[in-house]
Amino acid sequence: MSICKYILFCLGLLYMASAEVAAVVKDDGGFITVSGIVRDKSDKKVVPYATVSIAGSARSTVTNVDGEFTFKIKVPVEGTEIEVSHIGYVNARICIEEGDPELPVIWLTPSALMLDEVIISGRNPRELIEEAIRKIPANYSTELNRLTGFYRETARKRRRYINIAEAVIDLRKTSYTQEADRDRVRVLKGRRLLSPKASDTLAVKLLGGPNSSIYLDVVKNPDLLLSPEILPFYDFHIEEPTAIDDRPQYVVSFVPNQSLPFALYRGKFYIDKERLSFTRAEFFLDMSDLRKATEAILRRKPFGLRFKPVEVSYLVNYADHGGTTFLSYVRNEIRFKCDWRRKLFSTNYAIVSEMVVTDIEPSAANIPAREAFGKNQVLSDDASFFYDKDFWGDYNIIKPDESLEKAVNRLKKMHEK
């Protein structure tokens, strides 16, 4: 078989530092572009996945793996402030002025904010989780909202990119008192690049990729981790507290306490101390039984292919806007090895998908079923190619890191030959 195809389906699916020498560029579409690099003030290292937003609004993006960001802001910009935040840091703001060639360096300082030790030691972690679940209707939106987001998925063979797909998505989120399967995603714009090399014989596809914003919303999709039937399968522990967005957070870790016919997870929940809202979830698929782990992520593979999962990780962030909590960022990474029988060495692969919410507004209508992105659709099968440098217009995106930019240019040249 010359082409090896299998499809990954991950449970319905599938971050200051300083912004140094950030440029402000005027565009023709009635907006300016702000760009910068995010670094930690204490050790000067870049900080990936920091949230960059317009202060007091829901317009945002995140930094890439190199700590870089670009952010488009509508003119006029007088009085507009950019706010940068990340878990464990104090928020920082900088005023944007049109015409400035550069922004001054912004420093985010590690937060020393701590929770009351007496309160922490006196709380039962399982009861804390259950109380936060009961407060979901009060903390999360009970209205229909339109979330605009940017979605990217990439596939790497060893360190080389072989598949890149991106899209601006329209996500209609129904009330958090309703089930997650009532939410829908529509692709507004999309593009892709695939390696044309014959040696890249593995075609990796994520079914329903942009729908990760629905199925990995652990607060609205409790069957993943927070349903009353699931909670007894885990042991919970209070960890060292931290701060997110200048607010103190409980940190509750969880691990499986029994073996089931399907794979469970291990990870951490972050819960706002005052509001008792879930603000962040970090979790990993349990790899103690590779057969169960494989069944959780692999939908189909060709006969004779050996597949071994190495790690499956998830990150889900939420943000507060006007006293209501909304989904803000979702990331999933799958690392695995595979080879054909009788081959001596296996090959390492990595699949990454991420979605950042770039804007939120109330909406009166849901997306018609005929326009919704299907759970069995594949983004890289339908998107156009990467040739228009102004493809995204005034949409905010996640800036590609240096290695991804190089990969895009390399793949473009390969297609042009």
Image: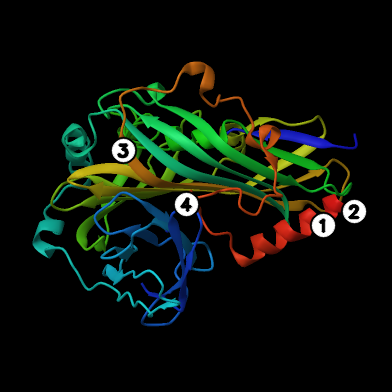
Answer with the quarter of the image where residue 147 lies: top left
Q: Would residue 286 be seen by someone viewing this image from the given angle?
A: no
Residue, x 57% and y 40% (percent of image)?
289
Q: What is the distance, in whole Å, between disc 3 and disc 1 at their CAs?
A: 40 Å
Residue, x 43% and y 81% (percent of image)?
44
Residue, x 70% and y 33% (percent of image)?
381
Which comes sooner in the sequence, label 4 or label 2? 4
Q: Position of residue 388 (x, y in %)?
A: 67, 50
The residue that disc 3 covers is: 361
Q: What is the distance, in whole Å, between disc 4 and disc 3 at their CAs?
A: 15 Å
Amino acid at circle 2: Lys
Which comes sooner in the sequence, label 2 or label 3? 3
The residue that disc 2 covers is: 417
Q: What is the distance, in whole Å, between disc 4 and disc 2 at their CAs?
A: 31 Å
Q: What element does badge 1 sit on?
A: helix
Q: Vertically, is 243 above or below 355?
A: below
Asked whether disc 2 touches disc 1, contact meaning CB atoms under 8 Å apart, the reply is: yes
Amino acid at circle 1: Lys
**Which numbered disc covers residue 413?**
1
Colour theme: rainbow
Q: Position of residue 349 (x, y in %)?
A: 70, 51
Which comes sooner in the sequence, label 3 or label 1? 3
Front position in the image: 265 or 317 = 317
Horizontal side of 248 relative to 88 (left or right) equals left
The residue that disc 4 covers is: 396
Q: Position of residue 323 (x, y in %)?
A: 17, 45
Which comes sooner in the sequence, label 1 or label 4? 4
Front position in the image: 390 or 68 = 390
User: How dense is the environment of label 3, judged by Cα within 10 Å: few (below 14), some, or many (20 and up)?
Assistant: few
Residue, x 40% and y 62% (percent of image)?
50
Q: What is the distance, in whole Å, between disc 2 and disc 3 at their CAs?
A: 44 Å
Q: What is the distance, in whole Å, between disc 1 and disc 4 at their CAs?
A: 26 Å
